[in-house]
Image (cartoon, helix red, strand yellow):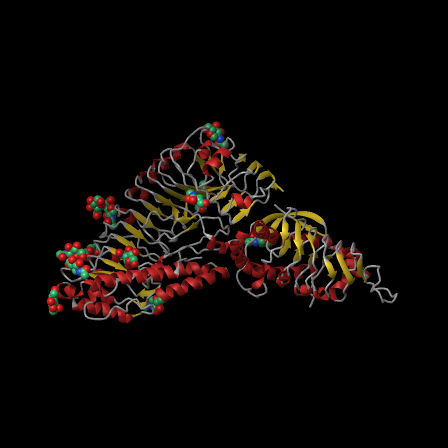
């Protein structure tokens, strides 16, 4: 999901722009030809040279024919002097950058396209749409700091990401010019605007040709590779005294010269050097650019303590320092930035305090302090004057940041988005300063030590506007409000609290927009005994499609911790362990009816299937033997009919089987692994079953004894407990993951859409995890079956 744009919209935009321009050109064509612009020949040649030097696959330059270059698309001339003043060949598709940082939680803020200068665009995509479900449940991603967009994208290792990169790539390639920028562009001596941003396949050996463009005011080259190996790119830029906006984002620059004798471009308003892996730190001359309103140094490999000098940039409205290695405290001088509207320090190593001077930022609207190791105490002093604040996002690592404001303090701000995570909010249980926030649409208060009940008044105030509510990992107690109407909530995370009582049965009516729901780890009525009814959805199909693909060979997934119950062999175990593997379906102890979907048998890599204690009828799918990795199959305590398919004996990995208490009939198949499952209780309670290991002989059988395999029992029993534990630990994740999605699916059919996307994602994980699992299994038990 690195880059998300809609081709058709882009095409449509281009088309409509084209038509518009065409309209202008033809309307008064004769008049225009007669009176106005005539292209200057030397400038035409410079443009022709540019066209010759690039591969114009998208046909962006197809209008570049004829004598009058002023009529060419992307070119604008001065109507008096006829000089070319603007050249705009930007690639809007490539311009859109959606970065995703390294959190696997799908509810985590994602920085959205911030290459746009439109301050109304939210920087963090706090409300990912369904498309973003693609990353639901994906493993933690890595990002490489200070790299350009593509490198960044490539470094995100998961195959899921690569797929989407490919998609976005083709979009870029299709719309991107490629090749070298002709240095003859330097002949366009009156150029004020030059915009080639988003053409990731363009490059230039150096920027020397820019030096002669002394009227240049706007220079956008984001994404263009600048091959300069040394610092001289800056010397070219320093010949442009009129420059107002400069973007060299993701240009593969490495050198940011520390000294400069004379600063020519002091009028600069916008400086974007983000996504370059600079080998040098922020130079002092940058702080002489006192007219800067926007400074973007996101992911530019900067570190150290944040320089006090930022306080000199008194005109700054937007300051982006995210995804770097800054540490220490926010310097007091930040308080001088009286125009600051947006500050991003997310994804750094900030381990100091947020000083009181912060409270002076009365114009601050968006504050992003995610993923640092903040320390200290925030009192009302830091918040007192933040009267414009609308979006406040802060996550820490160790709860060493404390919010301790006086009990009845009413803040001057009215937030729309609030994300506080892993810090500590000192209460009274649910502090007043939070309860008075009545404009909230996005709320995450996760792992912040909140206790008590949810203030119903607050919730009902914001319930109609709320789209995202995450109060997980606190000590919130009480029943879930039974008449809670959240018409617009798509994500509701209340897991890991002390909620009790029933889950409202009409939850899908109360929250018609809901796509994600996690209520696990409460005292609610959440897992293998949920009183779910209805049939098993045959949503397995999607899940399966790729399960059997051998898509191994990507980097190992980091562990994640889950805690869950599992019911194996009729006993409930609770496990709390780091899980690596998710290959289990546990829907036991519900009120499921109907048959076992045949599709489930295409889940060929499933390790455990527990459908016990339901009301399932129908027969065991004939081709159950396809599930050749199945180690645990528990269908006990249902109403399953018919004979046991002979293919069951193909399940060579099967270690635990329980078919007891059903209506199965006929002969128990034998052979292979089934020979080792000699415990007759696993077939018990099926009056019409016959054959070994049951004492009941089948009609026509001789009175001979079944095979006696006594030794096996001991061997198997010895590590039985450990074995179950192992299976459980490897399997539970899927039980849980499956639950949060498939469970909702059972509750509400219209959620399928998202579910399918989820399935799409999880498939890779399953394939990989199963590969790991098999390896582990073999190591641990020496089960070399073939
Ligand atoms: C041509 O331009 C004149 C003014 O220069 C304008 O009044 C007229 O509407 C234009 N012609 C058409 C067909 O729009
Ligand atoms: C110039 O424009 C007039 C009408 O505006 C037209 O009659 C004339 O033919 C044009 N001349 C040329 C050389 O195009
Ligand atoms: C040049 O064109 C612009 C708009 O197209 C117009 O506003 C401006 O007055 C023109 N300048 C002259 C000198 O004709
Ligand atoms: C170039 O055109 C795009 C629209 O295609 C626009 O968004 C951008 O601002 C223009 N660039 C400059 C420097 O004016
Ligand atoms: C500049 O970079 C491009 C793209 O990486 C490469 O194809 C080209 O050979 C490089 N040119 C020089 C002179 O290094
Ligand atoms: C500043 O820009 C002007 C105009 O391009 C140029 O002549 C001059 O050399 C530049 N100064 C420096 C120190 O680069
Ligand atoms: C930056 O400003 C300081 C004075 O504030 C001045 O001494 C220094 O020379 C300037 N640096 C550059 C590169 O212009
Ligand atoms: C900075 O901006 C102010 C007002 O916007 C202007 O007067 C001043 O000339 C600018 N400074 C530079 C160096 O351009
Ligand atoms: C903050 O991190 C820096 C760099 O890792 C370290 O030198 C410093 O001691 C840390 N400060 C605190 C207060 O932990
Ligand atoms: C919170 O602030 C109050 C008053 O300043 C103080 O008495 C109390 O100890 C603080 N609590 C914590 C946990 O810091
Ligand atoms: C909430 O959803 C309703 C329709 O269900 C819509 O009319 C309303 O505008 C939404 N409110 C917000 C704040 O999005
Ligand atoms: C994952 O868990 C295994 C087993 O507990 C452990 O050896 C490994 O180091 C963990 N990996 C990570 C990245 O934490």
Q: How many marks?
A: 0
Of residues 445 and 350, the one nearer the viewer is 445
Residue 688 in percent (x, y) is at 80, 59
Residue 532 in percent (x, y) is at 63, 48
Residue 580 in percent (x, y) is at 59, 55
Of residues 96 and 331, the one nearer the viewer is 96
Reply above or below: 356 against 141.
above
Residue 78 makes an appearance in the image? no
782 left or right of 549 in image: right
Of residues 718 and 254, the one nearer the viewer is 718
Reply above or below: 533 against 622.
above
Which quadrant of the figure contains the C terminus? Answer: bottom right
Q: Which quadrant would residue 494 be assigned to in this image?
A: top right
Q: Which quadrant would residue 663 be assigned to in this image?
A: bottom right
Residue 32 makes an appearance in the image? yes
391 left or right of 691 in image: left
Looking at the rendering, the quadrant in which ligand 2 lies is: bottom left
Reply above or below: 733 against 549.
above
610 left or right of 21 in image: right
Of residues 286 and 596, the one nearer the viewer is 596
Residue 641 in percent (x, y) is at 73, 58
Which quadrant of the figure contains the N terminus? Answer: bottom left
């Amino acid at each position: 999901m690195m880059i998300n744009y809609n081709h058709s919209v882009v095409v449509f935009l281009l088309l409509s722009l084209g038509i518009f321009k065409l309209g202008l050109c033809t309307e008064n064509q004769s008049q225009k030809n007669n009176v106005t612009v005539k292209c200057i020949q030397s400038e035409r040649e410079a443009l022709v040279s540019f066209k010759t030097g690039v591969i114009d696959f998208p046909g962006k330059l197809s209008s570049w024919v004829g004598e009058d270059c002023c009529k060419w698309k992307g070119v604008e001339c001065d109507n008096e002097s006829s000089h070319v003043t603007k050249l705009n060949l930007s690639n809007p598709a490539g311009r859109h950058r959606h970065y995703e940082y390294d959190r696997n939680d799908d509810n985590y803020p994602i920085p959205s396209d911030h290459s746009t200068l439109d301050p109304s665009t939210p920087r963090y995509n706090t409300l990912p749409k369904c498309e973003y479900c693609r990353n639901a449940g994906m493993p933690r991603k890595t990002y490489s700091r200070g790299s350009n967009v593509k490198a960044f994208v490539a470094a995100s290792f998961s195959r899921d990401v690569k797929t989407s990169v490919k998609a976005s790539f083709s979009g870029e390639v299709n719309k991107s010019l490629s090749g070298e920028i002709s240095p003859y562009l330097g002949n366009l001596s009156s150029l004020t605007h030059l915009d080639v941003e988003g053409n990731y396949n363009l490059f230039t050996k150096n920027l020397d040709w820019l030096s002669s463009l002394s009227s240049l005011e706007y220079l956008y080259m984001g994404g263009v590779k600048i091959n300069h190996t040394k610092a001289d790119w800056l010397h070219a830029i320093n010949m442009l005294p009129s420059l107002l906006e400069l973007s060299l984002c993701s240009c593969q620059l490495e050198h940011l010269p520390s000294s400069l004798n004379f600063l020519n471009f002091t009028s600069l308003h916008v400086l974007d050097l983000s996504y370059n892996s600079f080998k040098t730190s922020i130079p002092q001359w940058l702080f002489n650019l006192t007219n800067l309103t926007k400074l973007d140094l996101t992911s530019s490999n900067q570190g150290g303590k944040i320089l006090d000098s930022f306080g000199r940039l008194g005109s700054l409205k937007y300051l982006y320092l995210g995804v770097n290695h800054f540490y220490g405290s926010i310097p007091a001088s930040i308080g001088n930035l009286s125009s600051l509207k947006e500050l991003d320090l997310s994804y750094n190593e900030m381990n100091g305090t947020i000083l009181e001077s912060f409270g002076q930022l009365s114009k601050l609207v968006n504050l992003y302090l995610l993923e640092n190791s903040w320390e200290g105490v925030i009192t009302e002093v830091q918040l007192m004057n933040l009267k414009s604040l609308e979006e406040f996002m802060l996550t820490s690592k160790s709860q060493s940041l404390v919010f301790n404001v006086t009990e009845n303090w009413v803040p001057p701000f009215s937030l729309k988005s609030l994300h506080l995570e892993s810090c500590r909010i000192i209460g009274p249980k649910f502090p007043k300063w939070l309860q008075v926030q009545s404009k909230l649409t996005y709320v995450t208060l996760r792992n912040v030590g909140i206790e008590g009940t949810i203030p119903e008044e607050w919730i009902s105030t914001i319930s109609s506007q709320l789209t995202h509510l995450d109060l997980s990992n606190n000590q919130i107690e009480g029943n879930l409000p039974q008449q809670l109407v959240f018409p617009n909530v798509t994500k509701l995370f209340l897991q890991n609290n002390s909620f009790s009582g029933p889950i409202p049965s009409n939850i899908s009516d109360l929250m018609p927009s809901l796509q994600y729901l996690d209520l696990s780890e409460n005292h609610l009525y959440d897992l293998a005994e949920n009183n779910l009814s209805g049939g098993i959805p045959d949503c397995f199909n999607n899940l399966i499609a790729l399960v059997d693909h051998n898509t191994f060979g990507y980097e190992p997934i980091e562990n994640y911790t889950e805690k869950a119950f599992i019911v194996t062999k009729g006993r409930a175990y609770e496990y709390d362990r780091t899980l690596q593997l998710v290959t289990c379906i546990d829907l036991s102890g519900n009120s499921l009816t109907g048959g076992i979907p045949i599709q489930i048998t295409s889940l060929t890599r499933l390790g455990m299937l527990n459908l016990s204690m339901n009301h399932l009828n129908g027969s065991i799918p004939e081709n159950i033997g396809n599930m050749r990795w199945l180690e645990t199959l528990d269908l006990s305590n249902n109403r399953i009919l018919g004979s046991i398919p002979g293919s069951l004996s193909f399940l060579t990995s099967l270690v635990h089987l329980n078919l007891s208490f059903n209506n199965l009939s006929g002969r128990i198949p034998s052979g292979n692994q089934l020979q080792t499952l000699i415990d007759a209780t696993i077939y018990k309670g099926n009056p019409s079953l016959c054959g070994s290991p049951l004492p009941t002989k089948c009609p026509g059988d001789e009175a001979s004894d079944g095979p006696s395999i006594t030794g096996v029992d001991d061997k198997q029993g010895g590590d039985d407990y450990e074995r179950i534990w192992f299976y459980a630990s490897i399997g539970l994740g899927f039980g849980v993951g499956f639950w949060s999605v498939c469970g909702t699916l059972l509750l509400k059919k219209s959620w399928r859409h998202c579910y399918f996307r989820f399935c799409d994602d999880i498939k890779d994980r399953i394939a990989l995890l199963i590969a790991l699992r098999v390896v582990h299994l073999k190591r641990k038990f020496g089960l070399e079956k073939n």
